[in-house]
Image (tube, rainbow, N blue to C red):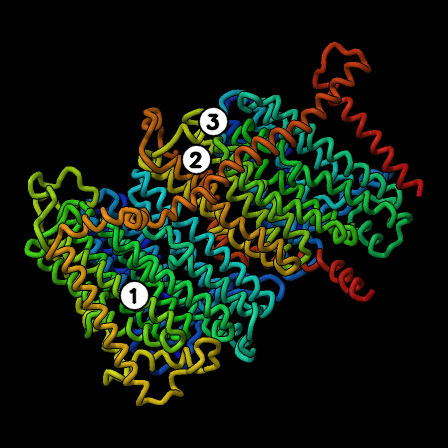
Amino acid sequence: MNGDGLNSIILTLVTFAPLAGGLLLMLLPRRDRDIRIFSLVVSLLTFVMSLHLPVYFRRGQSGFQFSIDKPWISTPNIHYHMAVDGISLWLVVLTTFLTPLCVLISWNSVHERVKEFFILLLILETALIGVFTSLDLFLFYFFWEATLIPMALLIGIFGHERKVYAAVKFFMYTMVASVFMLAAILWLYAHTGTFDFVAIRDQVAAGSIPNFPAAAQWLFLGFFLAFAVKVPLFPFHTWLPDAHVEAPTAGSVLLAGVLLKMGTYGMLRFNLGLFPEQSRRNAPWIMTLALIGIIYGALVAMVQPNMKKLIAYSSVSHLGFVVLGIFSFTQAGLNGAMFVMLAHGISTGGLFMLAGILHERRHTYEISEFGGLAATVPVYAASYLFIVLASVGLPLMNGFIGEFLVLTGAFQARPVYGILAATGVIWSACYLLWMYQRVFYGKITQLKNNAIGDITGVERLAVWPCALVALVMGVAPILWLSAIDPAVHDALAPFVQVASRAVGR
Amino acid sequence: MNPNLNLWLIPVLPLAGAAINGFLGKKSSRTAVTTVALFFAGAAFAWALVVAARFSSLALPHEEPFAHWIRSGNFSVDFAFYLDQLSLVMLLIVTGVGFLIHVYSVGYMWDDPSYYRFFTYLNLFMFFMLTLVLAGNYLQMFIGWEGVGLASYLLIGFWFTKDSAASAGKKAFIVNRIGDFGFLIALFLLIKHFGSLNFSQVFEAVKPLAPEAAGVGLLTTIGILLMVGAAGKSAQIPLYVWLPDAMEGPTPVSALIHAATMVTAGVYMISRSHVIFERAPGALTVVAVIGTLTAFFAATIGIAQTDIKKVLAYSTVSQLGYMFMACGVGAFSAGIFHLMTHAFFKGLLFLAAGSVIHAVGGEQDMRKMGGLRRKIPWTFWTMTAGTLAIAGIPGLAGFFSKDEILWRAYQANWTYWLVGLITAFITSFYMFRLWFLTFFGEYRGEVEARGHDTHDAHGGHGHGGIHESPRVMVVPLVILAILSVIGGYVGVPASLGGSNHFERFLDPVFHSQATSGGEATAPPEGREPKTESSNELMFTGISVVVAFLGFGAAWLLYYRRPELPGRIAASMSGAYQTLVHKYYVDEIYAALFVRPLINGSTRILWQGVDRKVIDAAVNDAGYGAEHVSDEARHMQSGNIRSYAGWVAAGCAVIVAFMIWMGVGR
């Protein structure tokens, strides 16, 4: 098959390979070991296929690539339109990278209903990838909602004590918000006759949609609310800690690593892409909420007695950086926002895996149950510290690059926001290092902790790739930025015009 | 064209050592670990010497781009190395003193079960410190800046099973981060207004600017923010609190990181940014005032400390204050000169203190020492050299550098000089106090009686009794002692018949574009040589007198009449207790910042806002819908389906409304 042919079907392959694997899995007999190996092979194959995207992506070129656009349903006019640009490209790869690691981290920790677990995991992967590759709004919404079901089931079936409460809360919270987006999508369809993102964007730019100026603010809010809950932006965040604490490790990894980014990706793609004027108008309060999220999330994280809740609240803080960067409308801010999305996916994914490893041994996430572990499980402790440093944003690690760019952008746009957000560098050190000290330093206070085993081979295979990528992203961010930068430049084009028009008035 | 010096090798060599020991050290023998660590630290030193040998043939500043790092639109930051006289001086100090301390550590840490881990961290520190001093832009400097903070965190908390050590490491990291916050804001301002973080580009852009007069202009703001960063890293008021706690780390760490190199990074950074500061007199004043106050304040605390390392820690804070005082009056080369001599004598003092602690089996309380001079003669004599040097006894390294600072401070503002002079007296006093308490009088400890194999946190050698350290520790002491004695002769001022080679060497860095402003008004070149130099000689005389007065006071109180200090302390117990408790600054910070933050976050934000307001509202909405559905549909109980149904129905209404609204217009 020649390169062009492959280029046009690669997204279809990558998106649906996990689903195909999941369907095949249904036919397999319930031999847990085979099921694990099969899932690993499927997810690894998907990852390898997805590497085609960054390898053959024409960098320095803006716009969508690898696109496929076929009519699917004629009334309503729905297309099978998939493509990626420098923004969605990396989110796809992030998903395919984290899924095999999720399989590995669940290798020994999921004992019951193993088959169902991995089927759900693979279906979830397809839904997540579909969200990032779809350019047809209907298709996008389909995948968007499709992520809910496997995730809610993963939490509700394989979670811990209050799993049903958490699953329902997660489901309802994000479902309700999504309905507003659906309304906005339907309005757009009713007035443009198409679900195609590119076509609608062009019509918006041309000003050819009837009644658009009057409805735009509502449409903007419809999309924004759905995304804000998913991110989650303060004050829509309270579903997150509950969902995380109850979710199984793999669920948490994909939830924090990828699912939250659906929200920020949506803001970047749809809020900025379709409603530049409204984005600019609403930016002040959105940035304010993002800023509150950064500081509030960090402070609440600091006092959490539960390790997983701490990491969950730290996600609120990190995702606040992403939203702040997006609504700064600066090149640095958006590049940084994209980079924080990826970096957070890697490092927080890693942190959740590490928390899961501990839970596996002690069946608790309470920080006070631990202490002095660095002496008994040194390799685990060192791996943990490495990921903590990535999350704290130590230079030469991935967290730093993103935060630095976001803050640079925010400072350029509104210095006060940049300054206040920059206090985040202090808070992140506070909550993570304090937690690390309580878990790993000091003397062993509980006898049980003497008996826990160090990180196993399978667990290393799950965690160390995160550590490695966190380092590579910090040392050579250019590998990622060279694809992101032109796409961001593209995304900002309407804002340059809006700004110059504003000046012109 | 300059030849390619492969400057990248200098930081990367120790990084390779850290990587090898980090991954393989656990299973390797101590000898293998030692070989790797010393080889790579030594190789960095050797390469620095090669660079120094070829230095005179270079066109300066010499810049070596290495690799792309960050690209975002028009903004870019690359890995690049920057060599001029200033970075060469720093390079030689860091690699030279660093290598000596590596050697010393072999003896000091030999019996520690985590020997390999120690050298991994130590090599890692070298990597970051060398990245810091060789950086070609502010962001790369920031890599080193935060990286040394990490190494410091790891090494302070090296004995992590001790809660105090773990807490001290965390405290150091967090307090440094507060400083880094200021540093970052300064960087954002530089990006916003100059579009670059490269030293050469920023300084080219700043040079044409006129000195800012009154008020707070852009450069003044940047300068003050950089000083916030420097105050964190270099332990100045109000961020000095982490350094005394950092003494929880092994003593070689205190010598290398918390005396000779890392803590001087702030001085280096401000000197590197002198182009900005010279045009921001307001910022310079801030630097000078903070430096002067810190010098005095920390010295007073040093008087009342009984832990030998704590005395040296406060002394370091105080001496760093001198360096900032120098920078603040525009005498950057004097600051760097003192940085260098301080690296020699304070590195020496810490290592010698380590040797003392080693000798008495881990005891750090000077009240349990005494009379050690005959038992550990090498340690005694080398420490004597260090003590004389820091006290400002004529002819030794510290004398020349401190005197240079005081003289330049006087020229700027006599109050700086006066406070500096009083500090010099206190310095001389507490150092000779330490000296007398440790080495003279009767031995007051217990080691000889019981041996010291049991309670030895610091890794002794298993043989009982007070003993001199092994040769691997003594040799670095001797080399540093020699440097502490003769190191000052590179900078003998004209008034004493010298020609201040050091200042002239750095001149191209600091005076190539002399437009110094503010309090550093009179550039030293433009003055009348005759009267100035006789004046300077008089001030030198005053400093010498003060140094001897300090010695005399210590001699009287801690040698001649050792019962007096107790009586004085009793008669002024309020003042004495204040000093012992370090002015209660830690307690004040805890009450003002730490506890309110934790309590506020717990009670107001988490339990209050998060649970009682937001989550309650969400759940109420849920239960409310449930309740209504009960009423309206007479369902048996509020189950999930009714809840879901009502939410969905509500949504449908909203959808309909929105569509209608859209269509209707």
Q: As drawn, which residue projects farthest toward the top?
A: B636
Q: Whole-percent x and y of residue B122? A: 30, 54
Please identify the quadrant where the N terminus of chain B is shown: bottom left
Circle 1/circle 3 CB separation < 8 Å: no
Mark 1 → mark 3, Cα distance in angstroms: 67 Å
Q: Whole-percent x and y of residue B165? A: 32, 43
Q: Relative to B522, is A285 above or below? A: above
Residue of label 1: B422
| Label 1, residues with CA under 10 Å away: few <14, some 14-19, many ≥20 | some
Side of A287 where B305 appears, left or right: left
Q: Whole-percent x and y of residue B70? A: 54, 61
Q: What amino acid is at disc 3?
A: Ser
Q: What amino acid is at disc 2?
A: Glu
Side of A436 where B309 appears, left or right: left
Which residue is painted at 79% across and 37% down in the image? A182
The disc label shown at residue A109, or none: 3
| Label 3, residues with CA under 10 Å away: few <14, some 14-19, many ≥20 | some
Residue of label 2: A459
The disc label shown at residue A185, or none: none
Mark 2 → mark 3, Cα distance in angstroms: 10 Å
Looking at the rendered structure, the secondary structure element under dot 2 is: helix
Q: Is residue B248 visible?
A: no
Mark 2 → mark 1, Cα distance in angstroms: 61 Å
Are the residues flagged by discs 1 and 3 from a single subunit? no
Please identify the quadrant where the C terminus of chain B is shown: top right
Q: Chain of mark 2?
A: A
> Can you tell which quarter of the image residue A460 is in?
top left
